[in-house]
């Protein structure tokens, strides 16, 4: 299942801004590599079609489960597999469980002081956390296809930030230690899901008022005339959501910083000033480039069923 994601711009922005929530002890390393963390924030999206098992890490369809209480929907992956099986979990998405795994992996990378792994896993973890904060990542109706609202996913997560994120307040305060990453991951998903009704209902109501002729417009993008949600419609929708996209992006920035900080603390707070002086080796860079090329090759070999 190839579901949409936060736009590339938003993922990059979230990872970049999260760096500025970190304490002074972490700042030299993360500021030195801020461009890497920004540019590679979208790697999971690049892999999602090409790499088996990647796509389910970006979402969870909570409405596919009759009951989502912790007694019925286990909060730990091993328990969930025992109850439902891996195939069922993959079909419905595993983002809160995968955030827990990625947190553990990043902690181990800090503990072993592996610069390449720290950077790769920090960038990836930021991506999954941001996805968990998107309301349309918590439902089977992820693109409005079940309610005649096809395209709402890209509208909410890409078009609105593209038009209005320059107005957002991204001062979210310093990173805090997360006592229970497991609870934090699930809390983010359920908070995002609670916003889903207004995402869908508000768009339906506004469409009914203005009609399709005012809903859409055309813009030139890279020399191609493209149909888009009009700026007027987007502004009205954004206003009626009362800062919802801003709140979710702010929550993402804060949560990414919190998790990066928590991984570092749990690893024993290694001296990142020393690591900041280390460059990625040529071997690291070559392996990174080869891996990304392999994603592209496999991507071109995959035939989309959408």
Image: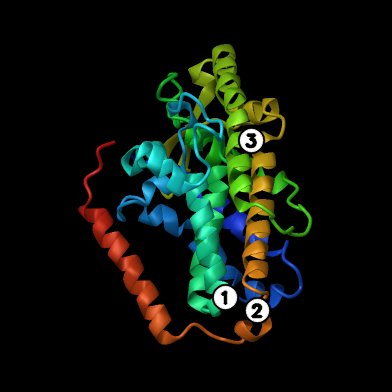
Look at the numbered disc 3 and give the secondary structure of its residue.
helix
Mark with earlier residue (2, 1): 1
Image coords of residue 156 (percent x, y)? 55, 35
Image coords of residue 88 (percent x, y)? 35, 37
Position above or below: 70 against 119: above
Q: How packed is label 2: few (under 14 Cα within 10 Å), some, or many (20 or more)? A: some
Q: Nearer the viewer, residue 235 or 176?
A: 176
Look at the numbered disc 2 and give the secondary structure of its residue.
loop
Which quadrant of the figure has residue 43? bottom left
Q: Which residue is mark 2?
A: 270
Quadrant of the image containing the C terminus: top left
Mark with earlier residue (2, 3): 3
Q: On residue 111, which mark appears?
A: 1
Q: Are marks 2 and 3 in contact (CB under 8 Å)?
A: no
Look at the numbered disc 1 and give the secondary structure of its residue.
helix
Tell me if residue 205 can be seen: yes
Which quadrant of the figure has residue 210? top right
Q: With 189 as the anchor, is 26 left or right in this view?
A: right
Q: Are marks 2 and 1 in contact (CB under 8 Å)?
A: yes
Circle nearer the viewer, 2 or 3:
2
Circle nearer the viewer, 1 or 3:
1
Tell me if residue 41 can be seen: no
Mark with earlier residue (1, 3): 1
Q: Nearer the viewer, residue 137 or 143?
A: 137
Q: How is the image coloured?
A: rainbow
Residue drawn at (64%, 38%) of the image = 245
Q: Which residue is mark 3?
A: 191
Q: State the CA–CA distance, disc 2 to disc 1.
A: 7 Å
Residue drawn at (62%, 52%) of the image = 181
Residue drawn at (47%, 38%) of the image = 60
Position above or below: 253 against 238: below
Image coords of residue 241 (percent x, y)? 67, 28
């Amino acid at each position: 299942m190839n579901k949409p994601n936060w736009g590339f711009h938003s993922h990059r922005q979230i990872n970049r801004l999260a760096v500025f929530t970190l304490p002074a002890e972490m700042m030299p390393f993360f500021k030195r590599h801020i461009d890497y963390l920004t540019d590679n924030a979208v790697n999971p999206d690049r892999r999602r079609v090409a790499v088996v098992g990647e796509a389910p890490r970006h979402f969870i369809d909570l409405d596919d489960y009759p009951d989502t209480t912790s007694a019925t929907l286990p909060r730990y992956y091993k328990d969930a597999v025992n109850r439902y099986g891996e195939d069922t979990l993959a079909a419905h998405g595993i983002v809160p469980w995968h955030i827990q795994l990625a947190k553990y992996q990043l902690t181990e990378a800090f503990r072993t002081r592996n610069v390449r792994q720290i950077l790769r896993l920090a960038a990836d973890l930021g991506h999954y956390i941001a996805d968990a904060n998107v309301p349309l990542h918590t439902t089977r109706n992820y693109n409005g296809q079940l309610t005649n609202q096809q395209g709402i996913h890209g509208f909410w997560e890409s078009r609105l930030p593209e038009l209005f994120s320059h107005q957002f307040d991204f001062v979210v305060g310093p990173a805090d230690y997360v006592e229970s990453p497991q609870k934090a991951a699930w809390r983010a998903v359920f908070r995002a899901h609670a916003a889903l009704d207004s995402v869908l209902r508000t768009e339906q109501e506004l469409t009914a008022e203005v009609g399709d002729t005012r809903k859409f417009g055309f813009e030139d993008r890279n020399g191609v005339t493209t149909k888009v949600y009009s700026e007027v419609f987007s502004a009205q929708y954004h206003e009626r959501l009362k800062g919802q996209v801003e709140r979710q992006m702010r929550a993402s920035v804060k949560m990414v910083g919190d998790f990066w900080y928590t991984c570092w603390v749990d690893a024993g707070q290694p001296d990142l000033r020393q690591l900041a002086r280390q460059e990625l080796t040529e071997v690291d860079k070559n392996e990174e480039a080869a891996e990304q090329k392999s994603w592209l090759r496999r991507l071109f070999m995959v035939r989309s069923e959408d």
